[in-house]
Image (cartoon, grey):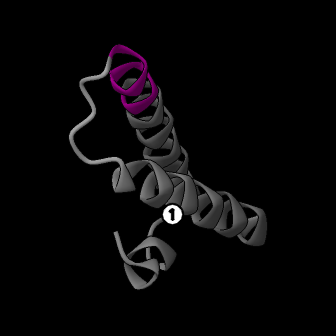
């Protein structure tokens, strides 16, 4: 999701999005551990989006 779209969300929406991202990150780690990861670049993108979301949550407070 683009940063523009994230900025338009409320704090509760950002928290829910952050929870979804953490779940996705966990699933990607498990896929990597079992050798089933098809898109290794997705790990970096999810980490970046988690950081952006956490930064926006801090700014909204």
**Spot occupied by residue 12 in the image (x, y as percentages of width and height):** 53, 49
Image-quadrant location for residue 41: bottom left
Task: Point out the stretch of residues depicted in magenta.
Answer: 28-34
Residue occupying the far top of the picture: 34
**Number of residue marks:** 1
Q: Residues within 10 Å of mark 1 (few under 14, many from 20)?
A: few
Residue under the image location 75 percent in, 72 percent down: 59
Image quarter of the N terminus: bottom left
The chief SS type of the magenta part is helix
Q: Kindly identify which residue carries mark 1.
A: 10
* Percent of width and height locating residue 31: 33, 23
In the image, residue 47 sits, relative to residue 4, either above or below, namely above
Relative horizontal placement of residue 41, taking residue 56 as reference (left or right): left
Q: Is residue 6 above or below residue 45?
A: below
Task: Please identify the quadrant where the C terminus is shown.
Answer: bottom right
Looking at the image, residue 53 lies above or below residue 22? below
């Amino acid at each position: 999701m683009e940063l523009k779209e994230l900025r338009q969300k409320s704090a509760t929406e950002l928290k829910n999005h952050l929870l979804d991202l953490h779940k996705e990150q966990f699933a990607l780690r498990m896929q990597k551990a079992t050798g089933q990861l098809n898109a290794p670049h997705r790990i970096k993108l999810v980490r970046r989006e988690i950081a952006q979301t956490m930064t926006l949550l801090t700014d909204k407070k």
